[in-house]
Amino acid sequence: MDIDRCRALIYAIDTGSLSAAAGKLNITTSGISKMMSTFEHEIGFELLYRNRGGVIPTKKCLDILPSIRQLVEQNEMCDKLVETISEQPQGRIKIGCAHHAYLSWLGDITKEFQKVYSKIEIELIHDYSSNLLKSVENHEVDACIISKREGNHKWIPLYKDELVAWVSENHKLAKKNSISIEQLKKEPFIATHVGEDTDYARIFKKYHIVPNIKQATKDVFVTYTMVEAGVGISVEDSLTAKVWQGKVKCLPIDFPTDIEIGLAYLENENEGLEKVIEYISKSLKKT
């Protein structure tokens, strides 16, 4: 059944006039009259009664009219869907994340995002903040969720965090309300990414803290398990501390250790990246 003829029939019935329907379709009155005659010949019965006042549907036409309307509506919906899909941005987007707490959220968010933008493929990369920002500046990563760093990148703030001290529940400091600078200098310390530009390294440098490093790791989870085993204490952001449930107590540090976490990226005309940034920033600000 020809969709254009179905649409012309609906316009003719709704307006009560072939000329009015022709105007909507931008064709001549004789043109729509010919369409209706061809339609009637095709299905084998009259569709319209014609008189001086215009046109009205026949009884048989009224019987099939709901199905014709549904057919035209579904065709229009299909056309819109095809248009939406064909205009969707596409490509491969690399998103870096420095904070373990955001990794699982990002996984869920990207999964939902790709239900809407199926042509955009998202790759998640984990590293610490300074490394990820360098990757963004070198155009190796498109955007990253990191602790705030200096640079000429665009910045969307997401969350205000702070550093906390990790101590084993059996450690002598576990009963304290907070950890002091002197205790950080004195206690055996487990350092993650020694010599790198980490958040705790920046804070230690600011307050001239030289920790008593006894162990070093390249993975924050390894650090966590060593603290849990009583090997020493460590320092991390409070969000990371919430990722694992073990026998580790998180204590406030008794001097300012504020950290701003946000989304860093470069100015880019990539429509796919713009969609990803908009979706992720709105979603994470709700968490």
Image: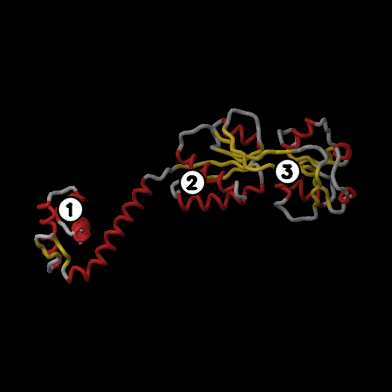
Say which amino acid is labelled 3.
Asp
Which structural element holds mark 3?
A: strand
Q: Count of labels shown? A: 3
Q: Say whether disc 1 or disc 3 marks the residue closer to the N-terminus.
A: 1
Task: Identify which residue, 88 or 211, lies in the foreground.
Answer: 88
Residue 54 on image: x %, y %: 13, 59
Q: Which residue is mark 3?
A: 237
Which structural element holds mark 2?
A: strand
Residue 11 on image: x %, y %: 21, 57
Q: Which residue is mark 2?
A: 121
Find the distance from the CA under tag 2 to the CA under tag 1.
Answer: 48 Å
Residue 103 on image: x %, y %: 62, 48
User: Is residue 184 placed above or below 107 in the rendered structure?
Assistant: above
Q: Is residue 14 left or right of residue 110?
A: left
Say which amino acid is labelled 1.
Ala
User: Is residue 39 placed above or below 115 in the rendered structure?
Assistant: below
Graded by Cα atoms within 10 Å as few (under 14), some (14 to 19) or many (20 or more), the crowding at tag 1 reads some
Q: Which residue is mark 1?
A: 20
Q: Is residue 261 left or right of residue 88?
A: right
User: Is residue 118 placed above or below 211 in the rendered structure?
Assistant: below
Q: Nearer the viewer, mark 1 or mark 3?
A: 1
Q: Is residue 52 left or right of residue 226?
A: left
Q: Residue at x 79, y 49 (%)?
A: 250
Q: Say whether disc 2 or disc 1 marks the residue closer to the N-terminus.
A: 1
Q: Which quadrant of the figure has residue 146?
A: top right
Q: Residue at x 54, y 45 (%)?
A: 123
Q: Say whether disc 3 or disc 2 marks the residue closer to the N-terminus.
A: 2
